[in-house]
């Protein structure tokens, strides 16, 4: 039978690549030719490409597919792009939703790689493009700042506990204060580097400036959103973006006997969720539209934190819209009742 498409599905771990070499025939049948494991290293990358050359027909293109999970896939993606291979990095939510449609009784690394390969054979794919150097640097810097803030908060809590003891250790207190001072200095340096990186790219600086027109959103938040989404490279619509951030709602319901409580999936980019928390609280103080929506949501279910998460989600969607349309935030546009009602419905 004639082979019409060839794909390599890769389930990526920190030290291992579980790879499925698969192909589709003219009649639509799919065959998983081979499943093998390779080290997640340059030598392993080379072996995967060599194996694909042995197993597949040379006249047809070969697509390499992997999920955008953490940072462990990046080395292989960069290698494939530099080697001139066709590579596609897929949103994790897309793969998980697709895998549910398959008759997979046991989920393993092998079956996951087969599902990724099958996805590549059945769907239209977009070629992955490496992030710009400035975006890669921004992501490193914003994540470094996040780690500094976490460490500083921990130290402040320890300092408070030490000072509250009956016999506090003066030397311990001095060391904690010294470390907190150092972290404050490091955070200031990182924030200055972030501003410099944004200023070094005129287009990126302009996009960030548009995002900062949203009440509650500052330069740091804009930098995190742009860096963590790679300027929304893999995003095609708002639903994908919300899922990527883990701000989508999961609900299990079947008939009248099974009705699970709706909850936030949190199966997404935690840096995005964290970056939007304080801007959402700020927006509630200075944006009348957000105040109105928040009040209506709280009146419906009485849970303030749930309403705050809904505001985070809407902020992310607004930032995506501004980036896509290259427009400033227009609060007046949303003061009409019809728009407010639609917004409220989307956040429930």
Image (cartoon, helix red, strand yellow):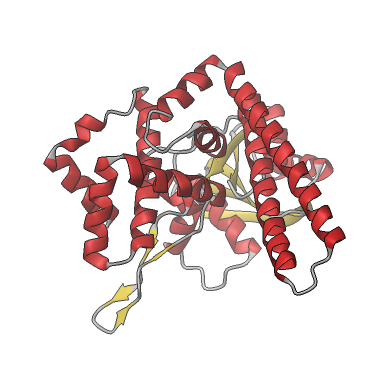
Question: Percent x, y for residue 102?
Answer: 45, 63
Foreground pick, 94 / 32: 94
Depth check: give the residue in front, 55 or 76.
Answer: 76
The residue at 74%/72% (across/down) is 165
Is 278 in front, or is 16?
278
Question: As displayed, is residue 124 above or below residue 158?
Answer: above
Residue under the point 45% across and 61% down: 265
**Given the current orientation, which residue lies at the most extreme right position?**
171
* Residue 198 shows in the view: yes
Question: Looking at the image, which residue is at 22% across and 64% down?
Answer: 300
Q: Position of residue 306 (x, y in %)?
A: 36, 61
Q: Which residue lies most toward the top here?
A: 202
Q: How many marks?
A: 0
Residue 41 is situated, as x and y percent measured from the top left of the image, at 80, 45
Q: Is residue 191 left or right of residue 313?
A: right
Question: Which residue in the rendered view is the most extreme toward the left?
Answer: 337
Which residue ends up furthest to the bottom in the rendered image? 257
Q: Is residue 20 visible?
A: no
Percent x, y of residue 220: 54, 35
Q: Which residue is found at the position 37% from the left and 33% from the top?
A: 214
Q: Is residue 42 above or below residue 206?
A: below
Relative placement, left or right, of 131 versus 123 is right
In the picture, the quarter occupied by the C terminus is bottom left
């Amino acid at each position: 039978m004639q082979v019409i498409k060839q794909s390599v599905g890769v389930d990526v771990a920190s030290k291992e690549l579980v790879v499925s070499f698969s192909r589709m025939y003219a009649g639509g049948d799919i065959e998983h030719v081979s499943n093998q494991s390779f080290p997640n290293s340059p030598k392993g990358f080379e072996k995967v490409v060599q194996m694909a050359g042995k197993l597949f027909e040379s006249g047809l293109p070969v697509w390499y597919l992997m999920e955008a999970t953490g940072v462990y896939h990046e080395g292989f993606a960069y290698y494939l792009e530099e080697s001139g291979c066709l590579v596609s990095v897929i949103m994790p939510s897309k793969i998980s939703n697709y895998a549910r449609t398959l008759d997979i009784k046991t989920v393993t690394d092998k079956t996951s790689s087969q599902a990724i390969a099958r996805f590549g054979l059945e769907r239209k794919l977009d070629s992955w493009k490496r992030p710009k150097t400035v975006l890669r640097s921004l992501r490193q810097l914003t994540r470094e700042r996040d780690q500094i803030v976490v460490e500083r908060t921990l130290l402040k809590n320890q300092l408070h506990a030490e000072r509250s003891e009956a016999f506090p250790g003066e030397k311990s207190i001095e060391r904690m204060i010294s470390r907190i001072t150092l972290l404050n200095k490091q955070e200031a340096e990182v924030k200055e580097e972030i501003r410099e990186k944004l200023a070094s790219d005129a287009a990126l600086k302009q996009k960030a400036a548009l995002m900062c027109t949203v009440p509650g959103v500052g330069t740091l938040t804009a930098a995190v959103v742009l860096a963590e989404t790679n300027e929304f490279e893999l995003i095609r619509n708002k639903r994908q973006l919300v899922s990527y951030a883990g701000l989508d709602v999961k609900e299990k319901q079947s008939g009248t006997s099974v009705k699970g409580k709706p909850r936030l999936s949190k199966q997404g980019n935690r840096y995005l969720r964290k970056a939007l928390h304080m801007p959402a609280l700020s927006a509630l103080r200075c944006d009348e539209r957000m105040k109105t929506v928040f009040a209506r949501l709280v009146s419906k279910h009485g849970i303030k934190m749930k309403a705050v998460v809904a505001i985070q989600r809407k902020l992310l969607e607004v930032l995506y819209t501004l980036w896509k349309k290259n427009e400033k935030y227009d609060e007046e546009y949303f003061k009409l009742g019809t728009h407010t009602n639609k917004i409220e419905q989307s956040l429930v």
